[in-house]
Image (tube, helix red, strand yellow):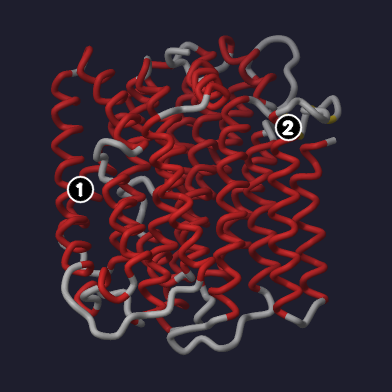
Amino acid sequence: MALPILVALPVIAAFLALLVEDVRVDLLILIGTAIVHLAVVALVWLGVGDLELGESKLFALDVPGKLFLTITSVLFLAASIYTVPYVLRPAHGQHEVPRSFVPCLLWFLAAMSLVTVTQHLALMWAAVEATTLASAPLVYFYKRRAALEATWKYLLLCSVGIALALLATFFLGIAASAAPGEHTGLTLGGLTTAAPHMARPWLKAAFVLALVGYGTKMGLAPLHAWLPDTHSQAPSPVSALLSGALLNCAFLAILRFFQVCIASGDYEFAKTLLVVLGFTSIAIACAFLVGQRDYKRLFAYSSIENMGILAVGVGLGGGATYGAMLHAVNHSVCKAGLFFAAGNVLRVYGSTMARDVRGAFARMPTSAIAMTALFLAIGGTPLFGPFWSELVIFQSAADGHAGLAVLFVVLLAIAFLGMAGVLLPMLQGTHDEPAHEPALSVAVPIALVIASLVLGAYVPPFLASTLHAAAGALGGAP
C-alpha cells in the first residue's frame, strides 16, 4: 500500500493546512509531509510495501517511475526547507502569504507523485493536468500584473498541450482495439503486450500527439513559450520544483508512449522524432540564452536546453539513454539549486534583471559561491555531475553520428558562453553593504552543490543500477 500513500498523504495534509490560519503551522505541515513522503519513497526502494494495487494496476511502479518519483520527493523536501525563510522573512514588498500557498504546494506534490506511480495512461493524463491546476496559483504568488499574465499563459498553453495529449491517449486506445485478444485497458503492461498487433497509423499518430502535447508541458521548443514567463514570475522554490521535478513528469509521460512504440517495433520512428525535437529545443534555447538579461528567465531557457538534451539522449539510444537518465538526475539537482540561489539574490537586490545585480560575491558570498558552482555544473564543466552525463551522450553520438556529436558540443558551448555573459558580471565587483543570508536559504543550494560534486566523482551503486535498468526499459544499453 506504499504507492497510494504517496498520493493520499499530501492531499490530506493540504486540506489540513487549509484549516490552519497560522503560517508557521502550515510550514510545519509542509516539512513534515515532505519528510514522511521521502521516508515512504525510501521504503519503496527497500522493497517494503506492495508495488502494485488491484487487478487494474492503477498504481504500479517501474524503474523509470521510481527514478523520477525519487527526484520529485528529494527536491520537494529541499524546496520545503527553503520555503521557511522565504515565507517568514518576506522581501521585495511581499508581506502576506496567500492561504492557498502551502495547500497548493502539497497538491502539486500529490499530482506529480501520481504521474510517477501510475502506469494507466488515462490516469497519468489526469495527473499531468492536475499538476497544472495545482501549480497555477503558485505562479501568481506575488499578484503582480506580470505574474497574472504568466499564469494565464501557463494555463492556456499547457491546456492546449494536455488536450493534444488526451487525443493521443484516445488514438492509442483505438490502435490497441485493433489488436486481437484481450489487453488490460490503457495500462502500460497491457499496451506493450498488444503493441505488435496495433494499428500502426493510429499508434504513430498517438506518439506524435503525445510528443507535442506532453512536450509542451516538458518545455520542448518550439512549444516552450509558457516556461520563461512562468519561471521568472513564480517564487523561487516554486520555480525550482517546476524546473527540477515537473518537467521530468512530462518527460516520463512521453516515455510511456515511447515504451509502447518500442514494443510495437516503431522504435526508429520514435527515436528520430525525439532527436529532431531535442536538437530544435537546444538550438532555440541557445539563441535566447545569448541575448537574455533576466537571470531567472536565463535559468528557464537553460531548462529548455536540458530538456532537449534528455530527448536527444533517449532518441540516440544505446549508451546515450543511460546518459539521459543520469542527466535527468544531474539537471534536477543543479537547476533547483540555481533557482534557490537566484531567490537569495532576488531577496537582496529586489530585481531579476542582471544589470541591477553587481558585486554579489562581496555582498552575499555564500549564495554567490553556490550560484557560481551550480552554473559551472549545469554548463557541463568537469568535476560536476552534468559533465559526465553529457559526455556519455556525446560519446554515443560520436560512435555513429559524428555530425550530431559536433552539433551537440557546439550548442552546449554556446549555451555555456551565453550564461557566463549574464552571470559573471553579476558576481563581480565590490559592495560596501554585506547582506544577511538566512542559514536555511544558503544551506539548501550548498547541499545541492555538494550533491552535484558527489555525482561528478562517484555514482552510488544503487543509483547506477537503477539508471542502467531505466535505460534498458527504454530500449537503451542496460
Q: Residue at x 82, y 28 (%)?
A: 50
Residue where numbered disc 2 is placed = 44
Question: Is residue 155 at least partly visible in the picture?
Answer: no
Question: What amino acid type is highlighted by mark number 1?
Answer: Ala
The residue wearing badge 1 is 415
With respect to residue 459, does 144 lie above or below?
below
Give the mark nearest the N terminus, 2 or 1.
2
Residue 152: image location, x then y, percent: 48, 71
Which amino acid, by three-letter code, is at mark 2? Val
Residue at point 80% right, 37% down? 2
**x, y (%) of residue 302?**
31, 51
Q: Decide if residue 46 is on the left or right side of residue 260.
A: right
Residue nearest the viewer, comparing 378 with 407: 378
Secondary structure under badge 1? helix
Q: Position of residue 56 (x, y in %)?
A: 81, 28
Near-viewer residue (183 or 129): 129
